[in-house]
Image (spheres, rainbow, N blue to C red):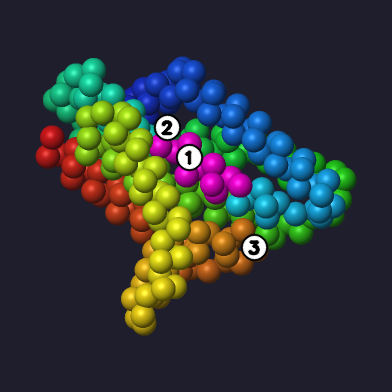
Amino acid sequence: MKTFAALLVKEEKAIFTTPIAYVVIAVFLLIMGYTFTLTLFMSHAASLVHVFFQIYVLFLLTVPIITMRLIAEERRLRTLEVLLTAPVSEVSVILSKYLASMSLIAVMLLLSGAYAITLAIFGQPDWGPIFSGYLGLLLHASALVAVGLLASCLVSNQIVAAVMSLSLFLLLWIIDKLGYLLPDPFNALVVNMSFLVHFRTFATGSLFLSDAGFFISVALLGLFLSIRALGQR
């Protein structure tokens, strides 16, 4: 446990002592602030549905930036071999990097909570969809980070890892459009692979265990494959 805690502190410092984290947070808040203000003045509705879908898209674009360096940079700097020869397991290495990345996501979501507070001050929002929307974003991000971490484990170049993650994220975003064109039963199978299909229920205020299970399953699968990929290096 002490070894894992030390690894986690190391990864937290690696993320929050680099300008990339603060640039990502600043750009995220700038775009979301503009979206929230524009939506509020146009709709005059105390709702964050449009904001949630905007954050969904931004996570597709920003998570590859966060995860691309996790393992690929260690390999480029030749510190991965040193790390793996230390008395730590592959599981500890992967989980520490995963949790550190998720902490940055949590900070971004926490700061975006100012929009919900603003709605509470000037209106009477329905808190059910707001809570479910944030839960959906957290689950969505957990799956994205796990997949991005896997991409960083598979390649040694950060840019390649980012492009690989982004390509896969975009495919899983629009794959439901392809699924609707396929015959039964392939249409349901392909549609249910879409991140957007499972996130939409959270953003609109509905909670289904199947949707939560989908994101959790993707996250666990990504972490498992990352551990296996790291162990084979």
Q: Which mark is residue 204?
A: 3
Q: Which mark is residue 183?
A: none
Q: CA distance from mark 3 to mark 1?
A: 22 Å
Magenta extent: 54-65
Q: Is residue 79 left or right of residue 180?
A: left
The answer to which of marks 2 and 3 sits earlier in the sequence is 2
**Circle 2: is it few (<14), some (14-19), or many (20+) Cα within 10 Å?**
many
Question: Does the CB distance between marks 3 and 1 fall below 8 Å?
Answer: no
> Which corner quadrant of the image does residue 207 belong to?
bottom right
Q: Is residue 220 visible?
A: yes
**Compared with residue 17, is residue 210 higher up or lower down, i.e. above or below?**
below
Q: Marks 2 and 3: which is nearer the front? A: 2
Identify the main secondary structure in magenta.
helix
Q: CA distance from mark 1 to mark 2?
A: 8 Å
Q: CA distance from mark 2 to mark 3?
A: 28 Å
Q: Amino acid at mark 1?
A: Leu
**Compared with residue 19, is residue 89 higher up or lower down, i.e. above or below?**
below
**Circle 3: is it few (<14), some (14-19), or many (20+) Cα within 10 Å?**
some
Residue at horizontal 76%, vertical 47%?
A: 39
Task: Give coordinates of residue 194: x percent, y percent.
Answer: 43, 61
Q: Amino acid at mark 2?
A: Ile
Task: Give coordinates of residue 118: x percent, y percent.
Answer: 80, 41
Q: Which residue is mark 1?
A: 61
